[in-house]
Amino acid sequence: MEWLESGFRQFNDGRTNFHDKARSGRPFVVNDGLVAKVNEKIRENRRFTIRMLCDELQQTSKTVLHEIVTNSVNYRKLCSRWVPKMLTDVHKMKRFASALKFLNRYSEEGNEFLNKIVTGDETWVCLVTPQSKQQSMEWKHSRSPTKKKFKTTLSAHKIMCTVFWDRQGILLVDFLPRGETINAVRYCETL
């Protein structure tokens, strides 16, 4: 509470700037050499933590290292973005070639070409899908007794479902028999 009273006194005395004033103590020294060392260490290993950097550069405090990493060299620690599948250069080139063929055919045939495109996808379908917590929410009065809900899990019984559709809508929904796997041969049989 003493710091609060001190703040009130300073405000009443006319102080309008509430930023920290310069004070005695260990100076905050960040030089170009230290910034370069930190940058080099991070480029060697992008998974470095501030603690690991502190172990490498023992003469520098964690606070100073954090300041250098975030403000001087402008690094941010980010997670990798999840993507469904890593594509190789060959995959990317095949997709590019297919897209180019589609564009050429569209320029020649117009909307009639779009009516010929059929695509498909597959997914696992659970036989029993439990109601989510969000789905079970209800408006209740504050004095009403709370409803209990037992935790349920997804059903162990699931089936592979393949769906094909075109521009107008769904053409076919096919359920794969248990024990079979989806592959190119199966796709051709279904089509």
Image (tube, rainbow, N blue to C red):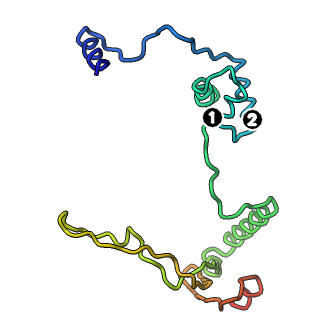
Q: Front-most of 26 and 31? A: 26
Q: Amino acid at mark 1?
A: Tyr
Q: Whole-percent x and y of residue 12?
A: 23, 12
Q: Is residue 63 above or below residue 47?
A: above
Q: For numbered disc 2, what is the local secondary structure?
A: helix
Q: Residue at x 62, y 53 (%)?
A: 81
55 versus 77 height, above or below: above
Count of number-bearing discs:
2
Asked if residue 122 is positioned above or below residue 65 in the image, the reply reads below
Q: Which mark is residue 9?
A: none
Question: What residue is drawn where x is 61% and y is 89%?
Answer: 174
Q: Quadrant of residue 72?
A: top right
Q: Residue at x 48, y 79 (%)?
A: 129
Q: Residue at x 47, y 9 (%)?
A: 23
For disc 2, the neighbor class at 10 Å (few under 14, some 14 to 19, many from 20) is few
Instruction: Please identify the quarter of the rendering in which residue 121 is found.
Output: bottom right
Horizontal side of 41 relative to 16 (left or right) equals: right
The answer to whether marks 1 and 2 mark residues whose Cβ atoms lie closer than 8 Å is no
Instruction: Indicate the position of residue 88 as horizontal and vertical percent values.
Output: 79, 60
Secondary structure under tag 1 reads loop
Q: Earlier in the sequence, mark 1 or mark 2?
A: 2
Query: 70 or 166: which is nearer to us?
Result: 70
Numbered circle sitting on residue 75:
1
The quadrant of the rendering that contains the N terminus is: top left
Q: Pointer 2: what residue?
A: 43
Mark 1 burial class by Cα count in 10 Å: few <14, some 14-19, many 20+: some
In the image shown, does 118 or 17 lie closer to the viewer? Answer: 17
Q: Residue 168 falls in which quadrant of the image?
A: bottom right
In the image, taking residue 63 as reference, residue 183 lies left or right, namely right
How far across and how far down the image is residue 152, in percent? 46, 76
Quadrant location of the C terminus in the rendered image: bottom right
